[in-house]
Every structure is written in structure tokens, then in C-alpha cells.
Image (spheres, grey):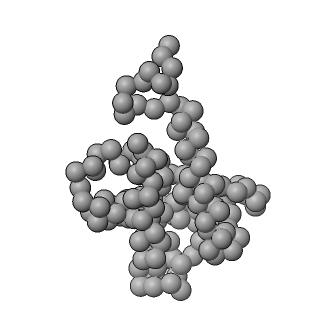
Amino acid sequence: MTSPRELPPGTTTAAAVITKTLLFGVAGWAAENLLYGPRYSAVWQGHHVPFLPVYAAGGLAMLAVAPHLTSVPAIGRAGIYAAMAAGLEYTGCQIDRKILQGRSWDYRKSDGLAKQTDGCVDWNHTALWGLLGLLGEGVAR
């Protein structure tokens, strides 16, 4: 069995994926709590677990895509990350509301995009996802 130091470039280990998943979920929770006050996921059924699955999923998706976008200008990469993560956020929101019977976030009072998506996605968070994607590219390397 090869050690992680002997892996070919572009490959990863299960431990690295788990670590990054935890990092994204906890960092997202910390940022949300710092910016907006207490936020917890309905996934945890009322328990205050400092981990937001939507950030974990968004971070992993960006890590998976980042190596394929190296030739795209930064503004294009940010747009791709923003659209991709907004789609994940919308999907997570629908799961939260329809399956988990929760309402972990609701941006309806934010802007026009939020009103059209039942409060699941807004322009501020979409722009933030794009910026986070660019910042997270260093983690992908």
C-alpha cells in the first residue's frame, strides 16, 4: 500500500476528504454564526451541532471542480462556483424543508432572487459562494 506522500498528483485519500468535509462544514457554521447569529441544520434534529452540511457539500463540490478550471479566468471561475453552489444550496434547502420539515435558512426578505426561490438562495450568498470558491482553490492544490 502506498503512503499519501507516494500518491500520484491529483489523487487524494479518504482521510483527506473526511478532514476537508469537516473543515468546510465547521467553517461554514462558524461564519454563519458570526455573520447572522445562531444557525444549525435540521439534519441534527434540534441538536446544536457546529456543522452545516450545505457548506461541506459546497466545499467538496468546488474541490472536485477546481482542478478542471485552471485555464478559466478568475471571474469565470467565481461565476461557476457561485452557480454550482447556489444550486447545491437550493437543493439542500428543498431537502431541509420537504424531507426534514425544517427551515434552517430563509432569505425571502433579502432580494428578488430570494423571493423567486422561496428564500432558499439570494444574491449575497451566491456572490459569497463565488468568492469562497476562489479562496478555497488553495485547498484543492
Q: Nearer the viewer, residue 26 or 100?
A: 26
The answer to whether residue 115 shows anywhere in this view is yes
**Residue drawn at (48%, 16%) of the image:** 2
**Residue drawn at (53%, 78%) of the image:** 107
Q: Position of residue 83 (x, y in %)?
A: 36, 64
**Residue 31 position by quadrant:** bottom right
Q: Nearer the viewer, residue 90 or 35?
A: 35
Q: Position of residue 54 (x, y in %)?
A: 54, 57
Q: Nearer the viewer, residue 45 or 101?
A: 45
Q: Is residue 25 left or right of residue 67?
A: right
**Residue drawn at (73%, 55%) of the image:** 49
Q: Position of residue 140 (x, y in %)?
A: 42, 45
Residue that protrudes farthest toward the right in the picture: 47
**Residue 113 position by quadrant:** bottom left
Q: Is residue 114 left or right of residue 46?
A: left
**Residue drawn at (45%, 54%) of the image:** 136
**Residue 87 position by quadrant:** bottom left
Q: Is residue 56 above or below residue 125?
A: above
Residue that protrudes farthest toward the top in the picture: 1
Q: Is residue 80 above or below residue 120?
A: above
